[in-house]
C-alpha cells in the first residue's frame, strides 16, 4: 500500500510523531509531503487549536507533556502560531527527504528557532547545503510543489495534520500512530467487527450553522 505523511511544521505533533515516521521510512517507502494547515482549515471551515484561546494553552501543555512522556525535547519557537510557509518550502527545496524534514523540524521544535522567514532560516539552509534560502524557497517549482501537495491532500480527504495516508485510509494525529501501524500490519482490520459496523452508523442529529 502507498504510504504518505502529510504534515505542517507549525504543528508540535508533527515533531512528536516524527520518530515513528522516520522508523517507518527505514522499513517502507513513505512519501513526505509538507502542506499548509491553514489552507485545510479554510477549506473545511475549521479553526486551528491556537485560534481558540482555551484550546491554545491546553494544546501547548499537552504537546509538552507528550514530549516528556517520550523522553524528548520540545522547545517552542519564539512565537506560535507563526507563518510556516518559508519552512515548508525549505523542506521541498531540499527534496522533502528524511534528512531535510528532520533538520527543519529539529530547527523549530528541538532548538526552538524562528522559521517564519527566509532570513530566519538562512543558517539552517546553509547547514543543509543551500547557499541562499531566499532564492531556494522563492523558486516557482517549489511553490508549485507545495500547492500540489495541498491539492493532493484535499483529494485524499485530509482534514488535519499530521496525517498518515495508508492506501485509502487516513490516520490523523500523533496519537493515531499505533492505530496506523496496526492497520499496516493487518490491512483487513476495518473490515472486522466492531470496526465494520461503524460504516453504517446513522446520523441522529445535525447542527445547523
Image: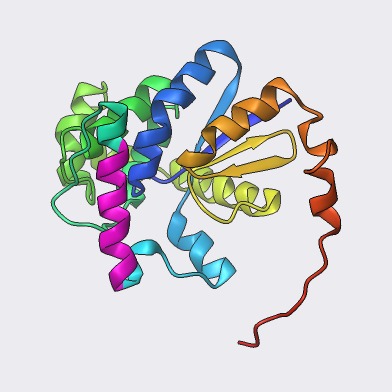
Quarter of the image that includes the N terminus: top right
Q: Position of residue 182 (x, y in %)?
A: 65, 27
Residue 9 in view in this figure: no
Q: Position of residue 71 (x, y in %)?
A: 25, 26
Residue at x 58% of width, y 47% of height: 148
Residue at x 79% of width, y 52% of height: 198
Q: Quadrant of residue 57?
A: bottom left
Residue 75 in view in this figure: yes
Q: Which residues are magenta?
A: 53-66
Answer whether residue 75 is magenta in the image.
no
Residue at x 26% of width, y 23% of height: 128
Residue at x 38% of width, y 29% of height: 101
Quarter of the image that includes the C terminus: bottom right
In the picture as drawn, the residue positioned furthest to the front comes out as 194
Q: Is residue 31 above or below residue 154?
A: above
In the picture as drawn, the residue positioned furthest to the top comes out as 27
With 180 as the anchor, is 117 left or right in this view? left
Q: Position of residue 167 (x, y in %)?
A: 73, 33
Q: What kind of secondary structure does the magenta stretch mostly adopt?
A: helix
Q: Nearer the viewer, residue 193 or 38?
A: 193
Amino acid at each position: 500500500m502507498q504510504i504518505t505523511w502529510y504534515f505542517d511544521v507549525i504543528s508540535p505533533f508533527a515533531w512528536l510523531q516524527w520518530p515513528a515516521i522516520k522508523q517507518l521510512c527505514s522499513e517502507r517507502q513513505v512519501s513526505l509531503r509538507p502542506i499548509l494547515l491553514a489552507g485545510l482549515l479554510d477549506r473545511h471551515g475549521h479553526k486551528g487549536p491556537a485560534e481558540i484561546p482555551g484550546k491554545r494553552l491546553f494544546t501547548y501543555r499537552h504537546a509538552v507533556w507528550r514530549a516528556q512522556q517520550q523522553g524528548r525535547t520540545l522547545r517552542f519557537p519564539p512565537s506560535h502560531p507563526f507563518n510556516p510557509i518559508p519552512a515548508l518550502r525549505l523542506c521541498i527545496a531540499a527534496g522533502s527527504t528524511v534528512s531535510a524534514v528532520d533538520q527543519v523540524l529539529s530547527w523549530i521544535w528541538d532548538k526552538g528557532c524562528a522559521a517564519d522567514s527566509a532570513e530566519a532560516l538562512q543558517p539552517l539552509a546553509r547547514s543543509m547545503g543551500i547557499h541562499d534560502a531566499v532564492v531556494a524557497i522563492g523558486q516557482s517549482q517549489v511553490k508549485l510543489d507545495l500547492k500540489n501537495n495541498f491539492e493532493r491532500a484535499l483529494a485524499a480527504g485530509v482534514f488535519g495534520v499530521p496525517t498518515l495516508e495508508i492506501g485509502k485510509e487516513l490516520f490523523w494525529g500523533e496519537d493515531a500512530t499505533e492505530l496506523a501501524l496496526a492497520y499496516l500490519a493487518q490491512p483487513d482490520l476495518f473490515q472486522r467487527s466492531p470496526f465494520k459496523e461503524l460504516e453504517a452508523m446513522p446520523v441522529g442529529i445535525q447542527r445547523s450553522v
